[in-house]
Image: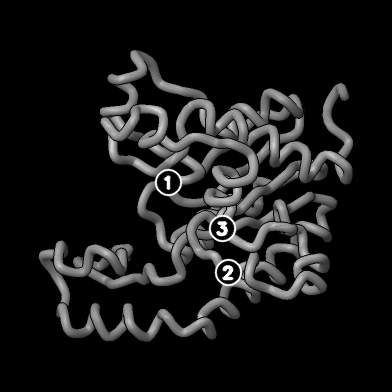
Amino acid sequence: MSTLWTFGDSFTKQHNQEYIDWKGYEIKQWPELLGEIIKYEVNNFGEGGASNYQIFDNVIEQVNKFQKNDIVIIGWGLVGKFRYVHNNEFKDIHPNDLNNYNYGDPHTFNHTALNRKDPTWFNEIYRWEKFIEAFCDSKNIKVYFWSSEENELIYGLPQELKNKRTYICNDSNTNLITYMVDNHGAKTINKETKGLIGDHHLSERGHLTMANVIYDCISNSLVFNGL
């Protein structure tokens, strides 16, 4: 059986214990649901809080395991996240939490976060995509990209450029999570719980919606196992 490989941040693999307790069970997330639709095994390497550097590293760690006819879906997160070395380890720094780290220089963090607002940083992601696409094409592997929080990354490109890459829902002009909510009725945890849990990740229904929409986006170019 072929494999669906998914990479990203918490919008690819989330964990909210409060939501699990509220539901009474742990929900299936969109990679698992999509795998069931297309009858693929699923390896989900989403990682909460991951920077795009960590996401790219996670792809590189697994790339030699990709096989012919596998599917790879990579969801990029905030470009503003960056890395800092502490105790000989990479640490992902979130631009909205700069005062919550007990290591590093706050001035350096703030300066770096400000610098990373420059859209030139998007080009780094696009170069990674070219490399990943070239590798996957050489192995007859389908690869798709999307952006979870950045409106301009991928979805801010001119349509003629979006059409040249394998972007999920390339008709969108906003990040994919907002697109799912606004255009397909996906619910967030906050919406489902009527504000009881202030989490803007996808709810159970939201994950099902996302799985179905992604299937619709990629199904025309794929031959699925047993379908």
Cβ atoms under marks 3 and 2 closer than 8 Å: yes
Circle 1 crowding by C-alpha within 10 Å: few under 14, some 14–19, many from 20? some
Q: Nearer the viewer, mark 3 or mark 2?
A: 3
**Label disc, if present, on residue 153 of the rendered structure:** 2
Residue 170: x and y, percent? 73, 58
Q: Considering only order in the chain, which callout, 2 or 3, is on the residue closer to the N terminus?
A: 2
User: Residue flagged by tag 2: what amino acid is it?
Assistant: Leu
Q: Quadrant of residue 88?
A: bottom left
Q: On the image, numbered disc 1 is attached to which residue?
A: 10
Tell whether 107 sits left or right of 50.
left
Q: Is the residue 191 above or below the residue 135 in the image?
A: above
Residue 188: x and y, percent? 44, 37
Res 146 seen here: yes
Tell whether 39 sits left or right of 32.
right
Helix, strand or loop at label 2? It is loop
Q: Nearer the viewer, mark 1 or mark 3?
A: 3
Q: On the image, numbered disc 3 is attached to which residue?
A: 175
